[in-house]
Image (cartoon, grey):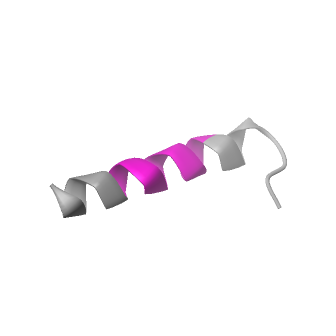
Amino acid sequence: KIAGPCSTVVFEINQRNRQNRDA
């Protein structure tokens, strides 16, 4: 499903958002 750096950036942002919610 990941195709292109844009998707990778969005994936990283989603991971960070989850960490922020857990913190």
Q: Nearer the viewer, residue 19 or 6?
A: 19
Residue displayed at 23% across by 53% down = 20
- Residue 7 position, x and y percent, is 69, 49
Of 9 and 23, the residue lying toward us: 23
Residue at image coords 79%, 53%: 2
Q: Which residues are magenta?
A: 9-17
Q: Position of residue 11 (x, y in %)?
A: 58, 51
Residue, x 46% and y 56% (percent of image)? Answer: 14
Q: Is residue 22 left or right of residue 11?
A: left
Magenta stretch, overall SS: helix
The percent position of residue 22, horizontal first and vertical second, equals 21, 61
Q: Using the image, determine if residue 5 lies above or below residue 7.
A: above
Is residue 4 on the magenta stretch? no
Name the residue at the front extreme.
22
Q: Residue 4, how many percent across, how many down?
A: 81, 41
Question: Which quadrant would the C terminus be assigned to in this image?
Answer: bottom left
| Residue 7 placement, left or right of 13 | right
Horizontally, residue 11 falls left or right of residue 8, namely left
Relative to 10, 18 lies left or right: left
**Outermost residue, left side:** 23
Q: Quadrant of the N terminus?
A: bottom right
Q: Is residue 2 above or below residue 1?
A: above
